Image (cartoon, grey):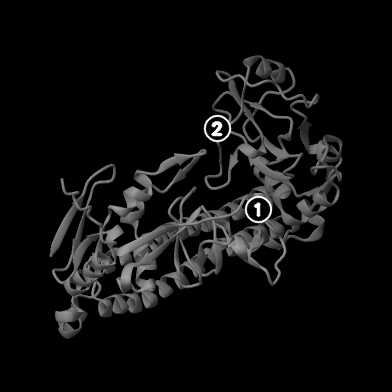
Amino acid sequence: MKSVVVDGSYTHTLNIPDEWEFSELKNVINLVGGNQPPKSKFLYEASDNTIRLIQIRDYKSDQHKVFIQKSDAKRFVNKTDVMIGRYGPPIFQILRGLEGAYNVALMKAEPVLGSYDKDFLYYYLSNQDIYNYVNSASDRTAGQSGVNKEHLEKYPVPVVPLAEQQEIVRQLDVMLAQVEQIKARLDAIPAILKKFRQSVLADAVSGKLIDLPENSFNEYILSDIAKIIDPQPSHRTPPISLDGIPYIGIGDLNDSTGEIDFDNARKVSKDVLKEHQERYQLQKGDFIFGKIGTIGKPFVLPIDREYTLSANVILIQPRKDIIPEYLHFYLSSPLVMKEILGDTNSTSQAAFGIKKMRALNVKIPNLEIQQIVVDKVNCLIRTQTNIEKQIDSAQKRVNVLTQSILAKAFSGELTAEWREQHQDLITGINSAESLLAKIQKEREASQPVKKTRKKKEA
């Protein structure tokens, strides 16, 4: 086993089999920067005389295609070329699959004299160690982090016999395809769980969840069973006060944690709180409902800390004979939300005013039935939450699995048995040492010979 310690802001040790060699990246891979004419020459329709100008964003979407005249193109890329995104976030994206000319935000990784199979190179540059090495030394350019090309060129990369590179690619193709299938299945589950939650809420308020007959519901308008309060009727946004208190709106709800992001919320003077306290006092079970921009998204408020509410929410305080959770579920249900959204004002952004909320027709069963429904819904939602946690954990493990497989590949562990069985393909003229020597010899031969000046005779 051979080892090398990489020093610097990301210090780590690289290990490779004795049959492989280390070389600085610049000796075996050329990094070729992109080029582009001024933006005034950009075109947005293709013609016989144009070529697509490839940018980092194009590897995710074709929505923003740009073309230039073929005569203005200097750097070219095909679908098999391995490209590096120079700027971020995230920096050092390893990309491929497009053809055209490429711009200054990209650079091409070109194997020197057949040193790397391109598929092998694509996988290799995607490993976590080299990413951490590049990211830890990234430059700052126009507010963006960028790849330090000179730093990257010094990185010790493995030189691997070409036959073994192809075997590594074969194994990685199989393994990582399986990982992608698992990821796709896991990624599809949250949408299924969301539909499940919506189905539970729909059945809860319709009575289907516990087989309630239609006559079990009493009809009200919402203001009959809850106080509907506009926290800030003037809709005047108070000035920021950095040492003030959180000013909470629907946008401050963190969807991933289901909690309010108090730390990053806008801060306002405590005088705003005093003004608001003349209108309302928060009580256990109170919740807010988005009325401008994001409509709905009911959220139960904590009462164990100091904050005030923004003008884009409605505060709802249920009456004593209404279980707050039941009303919260009711206003979250898809059928009720469909009715509310259908009655929003058509302005530059959606709005559902306080008068419409107060006049909303609702159907609520008695207190005993409300509690039965709440208990049933909570039980089902807990099950959903537990599944979501398991899925999140599984997704994290799968993401780690990809890098674990790559680490095994580029330390030689993945092909240890293959090397034992195929010594003829990795020794002699097929060895990494021979490949590296050939590359160095041909590089030296391609260097221009420096002319020496003859001394003039006295």
Comparing marks 2 and 1, which lies closer to the viewer?
2
Q: Where is residue 85 in the image (x, y as percent from the top left)?
A: 47, 55
Query: Horizontal and vertical percent for residue 366?
Result: 74, 47
288 in relation to 379, above or below: above
* Kind of residue at disc 2: Asn
| Quadrant where the image shows the C terminus | top left
The residue at which mark 1 appears reads as 373
Give left or right: position of 226 versus 10: right
**Residue found at x 74% / y 27%:** 231
Q: In this view, does 279 lie to the left or right of 2?
A: right
How far apart marks 2 and 1 lie (CA) works out to 35 Å
Q: Is residue 323 above or below residue 284?
A: below
User: In the image shown, does 339 or 400 lie closer to the viewer?
Assistant: 400
Q: From where the camera sits, is residue 319 visible?
A: no
- Residue 176 vertical placement versus 148 (above, below): below
What label sits on residue 264 in the rendered view? 2
